[in-house]
Structures are given as structure tokens and as C-alpha cells.
Image: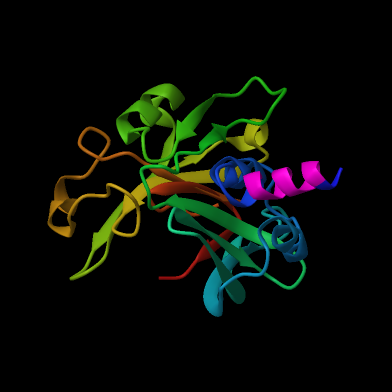
Amino acid sequence: MTVMRTVTGWWRTGPGRRRVWGKDFAKLAPHVRPEYVEALFGAPAFELLVDAQRLTGDGVSSELEWSDFTVTERVWPLAEDGYLVTWSSVSEVHAYSLTTTSHSFKPRIRVGSTWFSNGEFTNVRLGRTRLTDLSRALNHTSIHEVASWKGARRHDYYESYYFGNAGNYQTWSCGVSGAGYSAGEAGAMDSLGPDGSPSCGVTSSSNYPRSGSGSWPTSVRTRS
């Protein structure tokens, strides 16, 4: 048993760590407790407060409107292969994202409807799947939002998809940035798009993208 435990520990922190990170990311979901994320990935390396907005009202007896609130942004560097980011309040995670910064870290992430539903979905391979392939697989007309920006040293491009009831009302954002692997040069941001973009990354919310993928709940958003 001692030998088996030693070999398992060596595998999880050595050659098999990238596979473990991918499997642990798949265990995340909006509204999990921050302590649950730490149980999977350990203590975060960075933590700061950021401004965000959330929808209030029920849309029936009162109108829906955005109101300001503060969330805690936590960052877990995954060795030199990528990083995990979450945005949470005291008791729950509102959004999370995964970014790859290495050609060796290419986790597969299911984007779209949940298991046992009949909605659209596809599997994204971070650092390999291209945005044009993603939009085709999910039906290009389902893109909820497209946005890009660039500065002197930073640039981002992402596409958001909303999946309604079949996707537990989550919004997934997939895109590229200067922080991710094979993200191109900042000067090329004007031409980045579904047809010319490099491989994508993932964020999910109810989460938030880099050269990676993630998810946001549709009722919460960060403020720029």
C-alpha cells in the first residue's frame, strides 16, 4: 500500500499532473464553494477584489437591472503549463476559467449542454481547437457575444455561447489572449476572428476565457 501510494503521488504531481488538472477542472461548476476548489487545486497563489455586476429583480414584479458588487478573483498557476482563475463571493464560485500556456497542456473540455440533455455541445481541446471549428460544431448562429480588445502589451478575443435550460443557463466563453499559448501577436488582433484565429481556450459562468475556456452565470459579469 505504501508503494502504491508513493507511485500514485508521484504520478499526480509528475507525468500525470496535466491529466489530473483537466479532470479536476471538469469537476467544477458555478455555485460550488471556494473551499471545494482549494480541495482540488490547493491554495491559490494570488487573490484580489474586483468589481462586478449582477442582475437583480425577477423580471415579473420588478424589472431586471444590473447592480454593482465585489467578487474575489483567485489565481492558481499550474506549474508552467497554464493557470486556473475563479471569481467568487464568500460562499460560492460565480465563474471560473482555464488557460493553457504550453503546447504540452491540452485538456479536453465539454462546452455546451450538460450530460443527459438533448442540447448542442462539443469538446474543446485547449491549445488545439480553433474558434472556427468551435462555431461550426455549435452552430455559428448560436454565438451570444463576440468581443475583442488590445493594448500596448495585452490583447483578447472571445466568443460567448449561451445554452439555456439544456446547459443549466450557463454562458461559456472561448477565446485567445496574449497570456495563452500560441495566441499570436497583439498587432494581429484586428484580424483575429472565427476564420483566422489561433487555437482557443475556455471560461464558464454561471466561466471566463483566455487561450482557454470557462463559464459565467448569465446573471453575473465583471466590470471592465
Q: Position of residue 19 (x, y in %)?
A: 58, 40
Vertical order, 203 against 74 (above or below): above
Q: Is residue 121 left or right of residue 80?
A: right
Nearer to me, 218 or 132: 132
Bounds of the magenta span? 3-11
- Camera sees residue 158: no
Q: Is residue 31 left or right of residue 198?
A: right
Taking the image as shown, residue 178 lies to the left or right of residue 137, namely left
Q: Quadrant of residue 168?
A: top right
Q: Position of residue 219 (x, y in %)?
A: 61, 56
Q: Residue furthest right?
A: 1
The residue at the point 79 percent across, 41 percent down is: 4
7 and 177: which is toward the camera = 7
Q: Number of labelled discs?
A: 0
From this viewpoint, which residue is outermost toward the left? 187
Was residue 5 drawn as part of the magenta stretch in this picture? yes
Instruction: Give the residue at the far bottom of this rendering.
Output: 49
Measuring from the top left, give residue 34's x and y in whole percent: 72, 64
**The N terminus is located in which quarter?**
top right
What residue is drawn where x is 59% and y is 62%?
86
Quadrant of the image containing the C terminus: bottom left
Residue drawn at x 63%, y 35% as measured from the top left: 167
